[in-house]
Image (cartoon, rainbow, N blue to C red):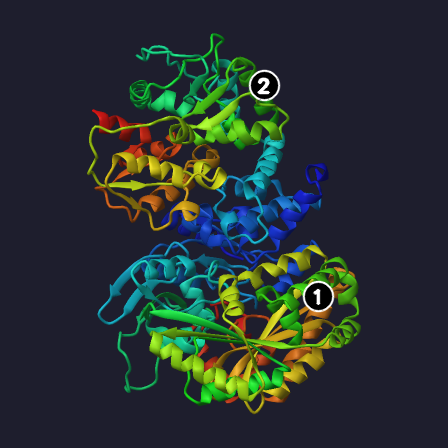
């Protein structure tokens, strides 16, 4: 077990274990459940015990469900400890001994159908009329394909109107999923195998534009951490729209909007202003959450928590929405966030939804 | 031990907000008492509670206490678990009542500047809620990120701007407490009353031994128009102490007053700017990080070596108010400091301190990573006693630990001294013995010099052996109150020696 801890990991785990819980308020799992077992220093402490060969599997298995990989804790950590990376190690221990029930099902689904849902997720039935050049490829990701085909059509409409280079999938079938669910659930080997397949199927691509920040982060950062080289450029749709689009709205929207910072877009990739600047092209006002940008609380979707600790995910989503007036439509450039908010009865929109409304 | 029937009843009442999962029992076996951190460091056993509950309402707290009292099961109230004296440690097992799901704002009265808040509200989130509305509580303990409003009240806490805004006891206008019988007791909101003793103050600082504080009404402030900072350097700590005394006795009210002694100026305040400081930080990093265990193994020699380094003491002052108010207060204060040969360092050290004001709490980890341990001792005394209190505690501890201090939370009649000590040892048992010996020596020195054993961390289990000497005759009265309110002794048994 000790071999999972290199010098740097051990130092981070020890520092976190003996910290007086300074990031507690910033951890949505700890703060909104009230559960001390989810405080970063406590759950990392459960991992640290493994470096001393005295880990308690029952304690660890439960505690490690309480991390959204949102990185908000690091905003308040002078030692800049990366708790999601430590929790990924923790979950790999769980996977090695007694995987979370959902992991087995998700692994099987990804192996058989290329996505975590086990559905035949396709986008070829969608109506998009123009493939200008096969240079820029849109990678919608499994959540958009499963839940938001309508938004995808709107995205194509906006891109088409903006004379953008984009394409469908390469000729070879591409899995709908980047593999994030496997990595987040600790199935590192399964993830590695899947990542290699995805890269192989995208080998002709020059630039991949993801509609999901989880996918972008996974391609940009996690693939290389398991030794899978990504031979193409990866951009979030926020980056791509900022760099490549000259979007001109037909009208400015006056509806009440509020902007939510997705964790992977914001804290993980530092994209705060870019999304806002895009939104401002089409709306005359957008409100901010009390906790926004680096302080934005997770929506409750990260780290696959909805699949391994549903009640915790619900508590965090409800807390995020608690003080938000129902008249607001929430702009969240992440399909995971939107799904959580819609599940709680709120209207949640992507930037493409906003743009499409502004040209309708 | 808790009867299985009671567990079933509580699970039936609270659902998944009642648990005996091993992860919960382990997580709630400790707070941030360094004695227990040494045990964790050394892989030693810490007795867990038998059960954990998370009530959402005062009614649920009431039912839990009634049932626990009927069964004679110990109760440990739990907020943020950030206390450093073992006040939230369920040493005798029983039920931990975690209050963090009680986090509603019940009332905000902007006209009277009052807020009624439930006890589980996190400190930082609470202050942000207020600041978003142009208000502030003015309470900034260094634990604000991890502590709760209820914990502040239960431990009689103080914040870093307490010299102006007061301590938590000054902020409490009313309080709601569930007594051990399950009865809900609350005081009325009023700015002051001459109708007998103040029952708010019976529960402020009661550390969970008399009941569970479920909500409190706190006095607020509008956010200050401006806040200015100043750093002043003195040739020694005594000149700085005299300056603070004169500032306070002239009727000036800085929001923050922090005077670092020579070693604290080297170690901590050197982060706060100035070329000299940066140079010394390099030296100290080498000493304290790379040779930490060696330095801490021979604390007297380390102290002797550090004494060779020419020392200076840094005073940080902050002033809140209107521009005119702070201009006057700053000018007067600088005049006083100049009379004591204080040298104005400008605003930079103070701004840097404010920016990193909670940073000191993160310094525990590297010491434990190095195999050593660290703790803090916060005492108080009148000005006539302060120099002696400072000298005697340092003398008592230096044989076993490296110790440094700063002076803060100033009043016209005295102030607090906040010592930090770090030490090391061989086996776990040796470390625990050394830790206990250091505290014994420090508390004896404090009481002999005429100081108070706690300014704002409370008593907990750590200082329980000394609290009777601190309170004198009042301790007997406290014991009788405890017997009356909690005849079965279920509330936080052992804390404060009760």
Q: Residues within 10 Å of mark 2 (few under 14, many from 20)?
A: some
Q: Residues within 10 Å of mark 1 (few under 14, many from 20)?
A: some
**How far from the left and from the top, in percent, is residue A92?**
60, 33
Q: Please identify the quarter of the rendering in which residue B1 is found.
A: bottom right
Element carrying mark 1: helix
**Chain on which label 2 sits:** A
Mark 2 lies on residue: A196
**How far from the left and from the top, in percent, is residue B284?**
71, 64
Element carrying mark 2: helix
**How far from the left and from the top, in percent, is residue A233?**
51, 24
**Residue B103 in the figure: left or right of residue A223:** left
Mark 1 lies on residue: B432
Please name the residue shown 29% across and 60% down the image. B133
**Residue B187 in the figure: left or right of residue A213:** left
**Picture quarter with the N terminus of chain A:** top right
**How far is the residue under mark 2 from the one under mark 1?**
52 Å
Query: In the depicted view, which residue is nearer to us: B482 or B302?
Result: B302
Q: Please identify the quarter of the rendering in which residue B120 is found.
A: bottom left
**Picture quarter with the C terminus of chain A:** top left
Query: In the depicted view, which residue is nearer to us: A118 or B123?
Result: B123
Residue A237 versus residue A270 in the image, above or below: above
- Can residue B267 be seen in this snapshot? no
**How far from the left and from the top, in percent, is residue B433?**
73, 69
Query: In the depicted view, which residue is nearer to us: A79 or A44?
Result: A79
The label shown at residue B377 is: none
**Chain on which label 1 sits:** B
Please name the residue shown 46% across and 51% down the image. A26
Depth-wise, is mark 2 or mark 1 nearer the camera?
A: 2
Q: Please identify the quarter of the rendering in which residue B92 is found.
A: bottom right
């Amino acid at each position: 077990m000790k071999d999972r801890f290199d010098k740097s990991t051990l130092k981070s785990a020890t520092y976190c274990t003996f910290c007086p819980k300074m990031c507690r308020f910033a951890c949505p799992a700890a703060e909104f459940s009230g559960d001390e077992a989810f405080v970063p220093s406590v759950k990392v402490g459960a991992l640290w015990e493994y470096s001393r060969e005295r880990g308690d599997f029952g304690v660890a298995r439960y505690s490690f469900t309480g991390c959204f990989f949102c990185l908000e804790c690091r905003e308040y950590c002078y030692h800049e400890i990366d708790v999601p990376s430590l929790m990924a190690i923790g979950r790999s221990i769980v996977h090695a001994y007694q995987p979370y029930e959902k992991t087995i099902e998700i692994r099987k689904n990804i192996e058989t159908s290329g996505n975590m849902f086990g559905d035949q997720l396709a986008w070829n039935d969608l109506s998009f009329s123009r493939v200008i050049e096969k240079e820029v490829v849109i990678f919608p990701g499994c959540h958009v394909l499963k839940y938001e085909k309508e938004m995808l059509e709107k995205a194509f409409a906006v891109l088409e109107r903006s004379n953008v280079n984009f394409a469908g999938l390469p000729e070879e079938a591409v899995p709908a999923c980047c593999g994030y669910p496997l990595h987040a659930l600790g199935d590192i080997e399964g993830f590695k195998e899947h990542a290699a397949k995805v890269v192989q199927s995208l080998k002709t691509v020059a630039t991949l534009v993801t509609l999901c920040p989880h996918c972008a982060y996974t391609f940009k950062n996690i693939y290389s951490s398991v030794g899978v080289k990504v031979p193409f450029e990866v951009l979030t749709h926020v980056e791509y729209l900022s760099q490549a689009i000259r979007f001109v709205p037909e009208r400015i929207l006056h509806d009440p909007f509020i902007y939510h910072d997705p964790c992977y877009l914001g804290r993980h990739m530092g994209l705060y202003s870019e999304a806002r600047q895009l939104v401002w092209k089409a709306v005359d006002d957008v409100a901010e959450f009390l906790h926004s940008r680096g302080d934005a609380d997770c929506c409750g979707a990260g780290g696959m928590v909805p699949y391994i600790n549903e009640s915790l995910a619900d508590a965090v989503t409800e807390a995020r929405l608690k003080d938000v007036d129902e008249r607001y439509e929430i702009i969240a450039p992440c399909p995971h966030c939107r799904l959580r908010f819609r599940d709680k009865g709120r209207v949640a929109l992507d930037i493409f939804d906003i743009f499409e409304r502004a040209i309708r | 031990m808790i009867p299985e029937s009671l567990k079933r009843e509580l699970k039936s009442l609270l659902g998944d907000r009642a648990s005996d999962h091993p992860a919960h029992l382990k997580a709630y076996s400790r707070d941030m008492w360094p004695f227990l951190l040494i045990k964790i460091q050394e892989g030693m056993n810490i007795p867990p509670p038998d059960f954990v509950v998370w009530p959402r309402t005062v009614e649920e707290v009431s039912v839990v206490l009634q049932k626990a009292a009927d069964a004679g099961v110990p109760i440990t109230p739990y907020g943020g678990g950030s206390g450093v004296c073992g006040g939230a440690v369920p040493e005798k097992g029983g039920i931990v009542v975690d209050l963090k799901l009680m986090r509603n704002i019940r009332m905000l009265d902007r006209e009277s500047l009052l807020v009624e808040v439930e006890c589980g509200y996190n400190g930082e989130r609470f202050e942000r809620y207020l600041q978003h509305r142009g208000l502030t509580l003015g309470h900034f303990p260094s634990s604000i990120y991890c502590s709760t409003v209820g914990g502040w009240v239960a431990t009689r806490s103080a914040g870093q701007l307490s010299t102006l805004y007061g301590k938590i006891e000054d902020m409490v206008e009313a309080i709601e407490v569930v007594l051990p019988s399950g009865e809900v007791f609350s005081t009325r909101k009023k700015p002051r009353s001459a109708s007998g003793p103040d029952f708010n103050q019976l529960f402020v600082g009661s550390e969970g031994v008399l009941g569970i504080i479920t909500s409190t009404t706190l006095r607020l402030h509008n956010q200050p128009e401006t806040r200015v900072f100043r750093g002043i350097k003195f040739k020694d700590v005594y000149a700085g102490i005299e300056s603070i005394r004169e500032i306070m006795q002239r009727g000036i009210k800085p929001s923050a007053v922090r005077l670092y002694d020579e070693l604290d100026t080297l170690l901590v305040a050197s982060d706060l700017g100035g070329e000299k400081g940066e140079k010394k930080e390099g030296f100290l990093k080498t000493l304290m990080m790379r040779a930490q265990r060696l330095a801490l193994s021979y604390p007297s020699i380390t102290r002797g070596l550090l004494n060779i380094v020419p020392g200076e003491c840094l005073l940080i002052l902050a002033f809140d108010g209107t521009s005119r108010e702070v201009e006057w207060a700053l000018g007067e204060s600088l005049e006083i400091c100049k009379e004591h040969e204080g040298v104005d360092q400008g605003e930079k050290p103070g701004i840097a301190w404010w920016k990193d004001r909670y940073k000191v709490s993160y310094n525990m980890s590297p010491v434990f990573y190095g195999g050593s341990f660290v703790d803090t001792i916060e005492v108080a005394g009148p000005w006539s006693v302060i120099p002696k209190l400072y000298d005697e505690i340092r003398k008592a501890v230096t044989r076993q630990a490296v110790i440094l201090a700063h002076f803060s939370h100033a009043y016209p009649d005295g102030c607090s001294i906040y010592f930090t000590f770090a030490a090391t040892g061989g086996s776990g048992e040796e470390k625990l013995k050394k830790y206990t010996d250091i505290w014994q020596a420090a508390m004896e020195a404090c009481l002999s010099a005429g100081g108070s054993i706690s300014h704002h961390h409370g008593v907990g289990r750590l200082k329980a052996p000394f609290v009777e000497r601190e309170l004198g005759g009042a301790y007997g009265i406290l014991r009788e109150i405890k017997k009356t309110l909690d005849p079965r002794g279920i509330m936080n048994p052992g804390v404060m020696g009760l």
